[in-house]
Amino acid sequence: MHQGITLLGLAAAAGLMTQDSRDQARALAGGQVARPQQLRLVAVPKPVGPRRALFNGRDLAGWNGWLGYPDPAVTYRAQPGAAPLGTSRDLGEHFAVREIDGAPALWVKGETWGSLVHREDLQDYHLRLEFKWGDRVWPPRLTEPRNNGLLYHTHGRPGAVFGTWSPSMEFEIMTGSTGMLVAVGRDVRGRTSVAFDPTIIAPHLRFRMNGREVDLVNGTPTWNVEAARDAERPVGSWNTLDLYVVGDRAVHVVNGVPVMAVRDIATVDQAGVRRPLTRGRVQLQSEGAETWFRNITVEPIRSLPRIVAA
């Protein structure tokens, strides 16, 4: 689930796009109101092993594709009235390796929602990739911000979340919100600190250093937290994302700017037992916008960088 038409529709249906939602967000944030923050990284860890490529530049070796519903507009309905496509359709029409700007890149069409999931189980790493938006956008997000995502600590079966994704924590890739934190799946949790921001749509929460701590829970007023600031470059430019993950903690960095920190990433079972989530696969989403990815690498680390005020 993401900001834009999806969140607007769900929020309206749930009665969240009201003064009550802003009052609720203000209470969750302990009355702290979001103000501009200038943040920087310190104590950036040195790798403790070699850097490896997750994308070989030739083909999709190591990646598995999955597609959701033929009509993405039904994705969030309780009764979508259709079965996910899964792997029944030629995935090469949706994910491929193509040349752009003189070099190979991983191409995500975006028309049918789904994801590419890397097969490797990752733990304690620094992942770096470059992305840029393509020219095309697709219904039902024709007039909404371009949308995609880097999902990490992926676990469970394909399509377990809305028939389309696997449970994960998300480093959002969306114009205006790249770096946002999203809990993908009702069993995923993570804690971060926030302030109330009345200028953004529900849930009106933005990451803030030394803010009020909240626990992300999908389907509740804390299902996402907006990035500290918009550090994305203009559409058509390449952006660099750095994801630092150690155990059940992570830091999101956009074009060198830290925009999110999360800790206590976990799963919660039906009995309410919380267990740390410290490893998993990565997913690259397809969610309504043509997207290019390149230079996808990981290297092992043993500590996280710290975010401090600039």
Image: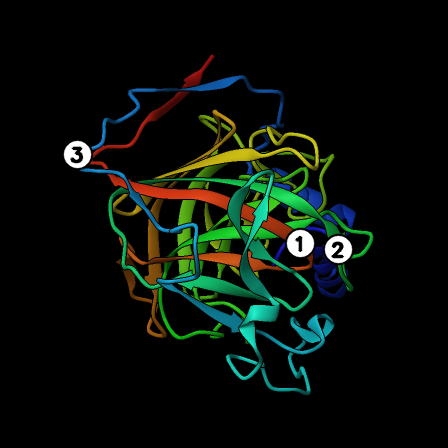
22 lies left or right of 222? right
First in sequence: mark 1 vs mark 2: 2
Q: Position of residue 309 (x, y in %)?
A: 46, 15
Quadrant of image for the N terminus? bottom right
Q: Is residue 222 visible?
A: no
- Label 1: how many Cα within 10 Å (few below 14, some 14–19, many 20+): many
First in sequence: mark 2 vs mark 3: 3
Q: SS class of the residue under badge 1?
A: strand
Residue designated by label 3: 48
Q: Position of residue 4 (x, y in %)?
A: 73, 52
Amino acid marked by disc 1: Glu
190 lies left or right of 221? left
**CA distance for labels 1 and 2:** 6 Å
Q: Which corner quadrant of the image does residue 305 belong to?
A: top left
For the residues bearing labels 1 and 2, Cβ distance under 8 angstroms: yes
Q: Which mark is residue 137?
A: 2
Q: SS class of the residue under badge 2?
A: strand
Residue designated by label 1: 290
- Label 3: how many Cα within 10 Å (few below 14, some 14–19, many 20+): few
Amino acid marked by disc 2: Val
Residue under the image location 47 percent in, 25 percent down: 256
**CA distance for labels 2 and 3:** 40 Å
- Label 2: how many Cα within 10 Å (few below 14, some 14–19, many 20+): many
Along the viewing direction, whichever of 60 and 258 lies nearer the viewer: 60
Q: Which corner quadrant of the image does residue 28 belong to?
A: top right
